[in-house]
Amino acid sequence: MIDVLIIGSGGAGLTAALNAKKNGSEVLVVSKTYPTHSQTCQAQGGINAVLNETNDDNNQNYINDTYKASHNLGNQKNIKYLCENSKNTLKWLDSIGVPFSRNENYGIAQRKFGGTKAKRTCYSSDYTGLKILHTLYDQCIKEEIEFLNEHYLLDLIVEENCVKGAIVLNMQTSELIQIAAKTVILATGGYAGLYHQFTTNSFVSTGDGIAAAFRAGAKLSNMEFIQFHPTTLENKNILISESARGEGGYLVDKDGNRFIDELKPRDEVARAIFKKNHDGEKVYLDLRHLGIEKIQEAMPQERRLVIDFLNLKMEEDLIPINPSAHYTMGGIETDIDAKTSIKNLYACGECSQSGIHGANRLGGNSLLEIITFGQVAGKNASDSAKEIDDLSISDIQYKKNEKQIEEIFEKETNLDYLKIKKEIGKLFFVNVGLFREEKKLIKALDYINKKKEEISKIGIKNKDKIYNKNLIELLELKNLITLCEPILLCAIERKESRGAHYRVDFKDKSLEYEKNSVCLLKDGKIKNYFEDVL
C-alpha cells in the first residue's frame, strides 16, 4: 500500500514527492505524461523571492504587492507564509543545483516584474521553470522515487469523505488500475487548456485533477478567475515571457507609440492590448533598443522562438503580439496546510486555490507557490499517512469506472471531438475572456449544457485498446466540460469587475463581492455561493 500517492509530475508534484520521501513515506507519482513535459516549463521568466531585506525591498513589501494584486481576495496568512519563506525556498532550490543566473557578486540575479516596485524575480536566463523542473526530476531519480507515467486519472476513491486512493487508466493498454493510498496529493495543473487555440498551455492541461476532485465532492473556489498573458506571438499563442518587459521592452502601436506602462498588473496590460486588437490595431513588443548582447544573455529562448515562428529578429524587428489564456487562479480550495475539504486529500500548484493569487497573479509567484506548497503538501500528507495503520477499501469506484470505459468502447459516435474542443475554445475566448457580460456568459452556459448532454451519450470510433488516443481525448473533453459549468456559474454570479474578471455590465469593484466564490457538487447538483476571505 502506498503512503502518499501523488498525481501529477510537474514542479509541485515533484517537490511534494521529494518532501514526502524525505519524511520517510512510501511514495508513488502518477502522471498522464512524463515529468519533463509538464506546464512548469512554461514559467520562463522567473521565481519571486526577497533574498535580502533592504530599504529597496523587504518581506512586507512583497506581502503587500501580492495582496494588492489579489484584489483583496488573497488569504493574508497564506500570503505571509509564502513571502516570508521565499528566501529559504530559493536557498533550497539553489542547494539542489538549479542553475540560476548570477549577478556581478555571484549571487542569484533578479529582475523586475509587473505589479511590483522592486527587482524580486530570480531567474535562469529565460528557462527558469524548465531548469527547476529538470533539477527536481534529477533529485527524484536520485532518491529512487517510483513513477507511473502514461497513466490517466479517472477518479478518486472517496468513502465517507475520506480519500483512499485513485482509479487510473493505463494509456498503453486501456486497463484500469486501482491504487490504494493512505493519502493523495493532486498536483495536476490548471484548466487554461479550455481556451483551445487561444492559450499558451499544452494539450495536456485539461483540468483532470480538479474535475476528479469536484466529482468526489471537494470544494472548488474562484474558478472564474483566468489570467491572460499579455504577450504571446500573434496568432501562435507562443509565450514571450514577462522577462522581456522586465528587461526594458516596450509595448507599442503601429506608429511606435507606447500606450501603457508595460509593468502594470497582467490583467490591465492584457485588456489594453486586447482592446487595440479588437479595434483592428496591431500591437508590438519592441526590444530593439536592448541590443543583441542583452537579448542573447537574458532571453535566448524567446529570441529563438521569434525566429522559428515568425521569422523575425528581436534585435531588428517589432514583434507582433496578442494576449492568450495562460494561468488559472481558481481550483481546489486548500488551506495553509494544503488540505482540501476531503480528509487526507491534499492539493498543490495550479490545480489548487491556495489563497495566494485571488483575482490576479503576480508574475513570478506561480513557481514560488508550487515549490512552497509542494513542500507543505508532501510533508503534511506524509505525516497524516503515518497515523493510518490499515486501510479498508471497496471496489465500488473501480466497478463504476470499469463500466464507464466499457460503455465508451461499446457506443458509436459521429461527433468530432477536436471540433467540439475548438468550438469551446473560441466560445470561451470570446464570451468568457478578457471582457465579459451576462448575456454572453449565459449563452456560453446554454451551449455547455447542450454539449454535456451530447457527450454523455457517445463513444469512440477507434476500438483498439493499445494507445487509444480517441479514448483519452474524450475523457479529457468530458473533464473540460465538467469544469465549464462552475466557471460560468461563478462568472455570472460575480456581478462586478475584479482583477482578471472584468464585466462590461458591472465595471466597478463591489464590497459585496469581496469574497471567494465556491462551487460544490452535492447529490448530483452544483451548489455555488460566496464565502468570506479568511
Image (cartoon, rainbow, N blue to C red):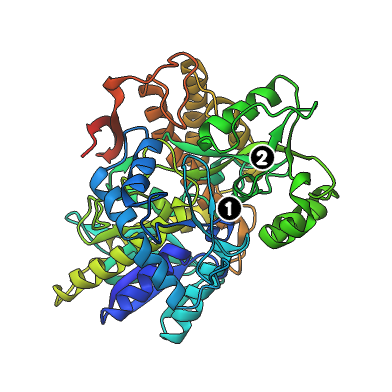
The total of numbered circles placed on residues is 2
> Which one is earlier in the sequence, the residue at label 2 or at label 1?
2
Image x and y of residue 375, in percent: 33, 67
Q: Residue at x 47, y 83 (%)?
A: 141
The residue at 61%/43% (across/down) is 199
Which one is nearer the viewer's eye here, 96 or 260?
260
Q: Amino acid at mark 1?
A: Glu
Residue 32 coordinates in the image, percent (x, y): 51, 64
Residues packed near mark 1 inside 10 Å, few (<14), some (14 to 19) or many (20 plus): some
Residue 443 is at least partly visible in this image:
yes
Residue at mark 1: 473
Q: Nearer the viewer, residue 381 or 462?
A: 381
Numbered badge on residue 419:
2
Q: Say which element carries label 2.
A: helix
Q: In the picture shown, does residue 149 fall above or below 487?
A: below
Q: Quadrant of residue 269?
A: top right
